[in-house]
Amino acid sequence: MNLVTAAFTAVLAFGLSATPSHTGQAQNDQSQPVDMVAVTKVTGTIQKVDADKRMMTLKLDDGKKKTLKVDRSVKDLDKFRPGDHVQMSYTEEVVMMAQPSDEGTVQLAKFGAADVQSEGDSPALVKVNTSVISGKIISIDPKRRRLTFEDPNGKKRAVKLSRRIKDQDLDKFKPGEAINMAITDEMVVAVVT
């Protein structure tokens, strides 16, 4: 197979006007910290590529199936075909904003996208969309900045907390309570065949 490598670099500025209730800082403040996110490398076989929607479905070598959005910096997405065995790198999910479920999801829906920086040898800034999700808090680990929750499907998930969420705001959330969150989507940042 030909070696096709796609790396990423994207820079953006916020410009959102909504002020979230538990971040302690307005989103349009350019001095906000950028979250470092882990990048997971996996290998598997492509099952489907939708170049228009920038989505790729992969059957991982461990047998699991994963469908991910592909960052615009990954070039020549239309050249990847079902059956190609690839190595893919994607960013982890991060809770960018959280609020008790009784406050609704209006501000969360306005969150939009976030800047995250990948960890590793050549970190780069990438724009990642967020999704609104609700769940029930299982535990919060402020030292490790991890939130474990049960999603609406009953699946237990552990997610990193953004540095935008201040430590003092974490005291507002207790295990057993319902929570609404804006979570960054996992994003493919490199594909090699």
Image (cartoon, grey):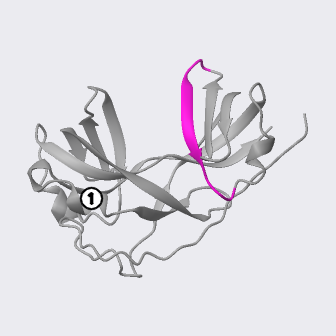
**Front residue (pair 60, 77):** 77
For the magenta stretch, what is the residue range? 62-73
Q: Quick check: 48 above or below 51?
A: above
Is residue 115 found left or right of 89 in the rendered image? left
Residue 86 belongs to magenta span: no
Question: Which residue is found at the position 72% from the left and 37% from the top?
Answer: 87
Can residue 43 be spotted in the picture?
A: no
Looking at the picture, which amino acid does disc 1 mark?
Leu
Q: Quadrant of the C terminus?
A: top right
Q: Which of the 4 image quadrants contains residue 105?
A: bottom left
The N terminus - image quarter: top right
- 97 vs 61, left or right, is left
Residue appearing at x 65%, y 22% in the figure: 61
Mark 1 — residue?
A: 108
Residue 43, position in %: x, y? 68, 31
> Does 97 appear above or below 88?
below
The residue at 27%/58% (across/down) is 108
For label 1, the SS is: helix
Task: From the top left corner, tell me how far across and down residue 153 is, in percent.
Answer: 28, 27
